[in-house]
Amino acid sequence: MRSFKSYLTEFAIQSTSDYVFNTHSVNSSSLSIPISGPMFKRIWPDMIRATVFHVLGAEDIYELKKLEGGKKSISAFFSMMARQMESGIAGGGGVVAELEADILISAKDDIMSAVDKKGRRWVEVSWFENANITGPGFGKFEKDLNNLIKGLVKKHVPPDESKGKGDFEVWMFMKRHLKAGTPAGAKKLSLVIKDYFDGVEKVIKKNKEVLGSIFYGYARSKRMTDNAWDEQIVNNIKIKKLHYLPKEEEVEDEEQQENIDAFVAKYKIPSKRWEYSSELEIYTREVTQAEVRTMGK
């Protein structure tokens, strides 16, 4: 069972530059998009603030507390089956934190997001295609991304380096083309990465109506899924309550109780022990549906 720190850095063997340049196709489908709270809030100022839930281990609740009010994003859910609450997804299980949070991306199933070494989340464009949640306007978004890469290659790579090669082939080996291992090359690479972030923001803003329906359609709907869990990428969290399940081993159960009691005493956050995960599952669904009924009022 992974710790919360491990959860925050899942797949974090890769740096920001790896996510920017590691493509594996000849078009934008393999590009990774940064899930940046500040960027999304500039594009969609009226963020959806909602009650969500996050599963973790009792030993990690202090790490979660450190994220309150911050920009760093985590994965949460509206709906999750009892078994996953017990075991967790990428982190520990047994504790479910009830949170108030800003929704950055909302999906009815696992969005397959990954985290870089700075804690920033990324999602590959192909996920949206494979999830069958794209509309007719999504093709324009992909075309704009293709043009972005074409423009960045033309701007930053000498013609003799890119001659006879596809834009995405050049992009994939940008570190080599710019000799990123040298001080001068590293500086050039940082400028390319900045241009990529700025360019992606412009492309998303240009297509914000189409992408807004994809990113937030589920959160604005009934928030019900047929999958084992849905995924909500959130930040600016506030812990409202801790829910927890008993451990099978007596020693582990006592340790969990001690951790939670100490946390509750320090931060004055309410908690509740549930004897059955199925009852906790019902509770989370009821809270979610109660909030859905208030939308639009």
Image (tube, rainbow, N blue to C red):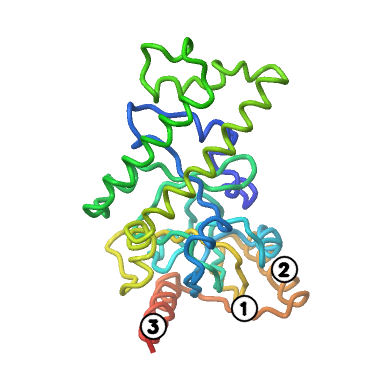
Which type of secondary structure does the marked residue at label 1 adopt? Answer: strand
Above or below, 111 against 172 in this view is: below
Which callout, 1 or 2, points at the residue further toward the start of the chain?
2
Q: Residue furthest bottom?
A: 297
Residue pointed to by mark 3: 295
- The residue sitting at 68% across, 70% down in the picture is 260
- The residue sitting at 44% across, 70% down in the picture is 277
Residues under labels 3 and 1: Cα distance?
Answer: 26 Å
Looking at numbered disc 1 in the image, what kind of residue is underneath it?
Answer: Ser
How busy is the neighbourhood of tag 2: few (under 14 within 10 Å), some, or many (20 plus)? some
The x and y percentages for residue 14 are 57, 33
Residue 26 in view: yes
- The residue sitting at 56% across, 58% down in the picture is 37
Q: Which mark is residue 271?
A: 1
Q: What quarter of the picture does the C terminus occupy?
A: bottom left
Quarter holding residue 78:
bottom left
Residue pointed to by mark 2: 258
- Which of pointers 3 and 2 indicates the residue nearer the eye? 3
How busy is the neighbourhood of tag 1: few (under 14 within 10 Å), some, or many (20 plus)? some
The x and y percentages for residue 39 are 54, 55
Asked whether the residues under the numbered discs 1 and 2 touch, taking CB atoms below 8 Å apart as contact, a structural biologist would say no
User: Residue 230 vs residue 90: left or right?
Assistant: left
Which callout, 3 or 2, points at the residue further toward the start of the chain?
2
Above or below, 35 against 68 in this view is: above
User: Residue 129 vs residue 212: left or right?
Assistant: left
User: Residue 172 vs residue 250: left or right?
Assistant: left
How busy is the neighbourhood of tag 3: few (under 14 within 10 Å), some, or many (20 plus)? few
